[in-house]
Image (cartoon, rainbow, N blue to C red):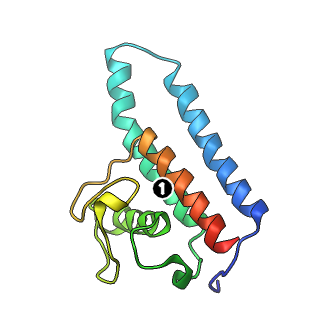
Amino acid sequence: MLAVSSYSKDYIDTCRARVAEHVSVYRAMIATGDGTDFTAAVAAFEPVFFNNLVLVLESAFVHRLRGKENKDGNPLTEVRLLSASLLRNGGILAVDKGIRWTPGATVLGYAAGDRIEVREPGFLALAKAFFADVAAKYA
C-alpha cells in the first residue's frame, strides 16, 4: 500500500470508537469477578491486553507518511516505537537513532531499554493523545 497523507474524520472516529469498545469489554470483564486469584489474573492480563491495543492503534494508521509525524517523542512516534519494540524487541523499548526521545516528554514516560507494560490509565492517556495527533496532522 502507498503511504497515506490524510485520513477522513469518519475513519479516525471509527478507529477511536473501536478502541473504546475494546476498553469497555475489558472493563466489563474485570467487573465480573473478585477474590485473590481473579485479581492476580487481571493484573497479569492487563498489560498483555493494553500492549495489544497499542498494536491496534499503530495498525490502523501504519501507512501514514512519516514526514508528517516529526522526529520527536510525540504520541504518533511513541505508538510506532512501542509497537515495533513489542513485535521485534521482546517488549523492550528500542528508540530509533533519528528520533529525539525524551522520556519525560512522552505520554507513558518509557526510556530506551524499559520493559513495555502498558496498563489501562496509561493506555487511555496514550490513545487520547494519539487520536488527537492523528486528527491534527492527517485529517
Count of numbered circles on the image: 1
In this rendering, position of residue 34 left or right of residue 6: left
Return the x and y of residue 99 as percentages of the image width and height.
Answer: 35, 78
Secondary structure state at the residue bearing disc 1: helix
Please tell me which residue is depicted at 38% across the width and 60% down the height of the picture. 106
Q: Reply above or below: 80 against 117.
A: below
Return the x and y of residue 95 as percentages of the image width and height.
Answer: 30, 72
Quarter that holds the C terminus: bottom right
Quarter that holds the N terminus: bottom right
In this rendering, position of residue 77 left or right of residue 41: right
Relative depth, front residue between 35 and 23:
23
Q: Reply above or below: 19 against 79.
A: above
Relative depth, front residue between 10 and 46:
10
Return the x and y of residue 96 as percentages of the image width and height.
Answer: 32, 78
Please tell me which residue is depicted at 26% across the width and 61% down the height of the picture. 92
Q: Name the residue under label 1.
A: 54
Instruction: In the displayed orientation, state which residue is furthest to the front.
Output: 105
Please tell me which residue is depicted at 51% across the width and 44% down the height of the picture. 124
In this rendering, position of residue 21 left or right of residue 128: right
Q: In which quarter of the image is residue 34?
A: top left
Return the x and y of residue 7 as percentages of the image width and height.
Answer: 71, 71
Q: In which quarter of the image is residue 24?
A: top right
In this rendering, position of residue 98 left or right of residue 64: left
Q: Reply above or below: 115 against 45.
A: below
Q: Residues within 10 Å of mark 1 (few under 14, many from 20)?
A: many
Which residue type does callout 1 highlight? Val
Instruction: In the displayed orientation, state which residue is furthest to the top.
Output: 35
Please tell me which residue is depicted at 42% across the width and 45% down the height of the picture. 122
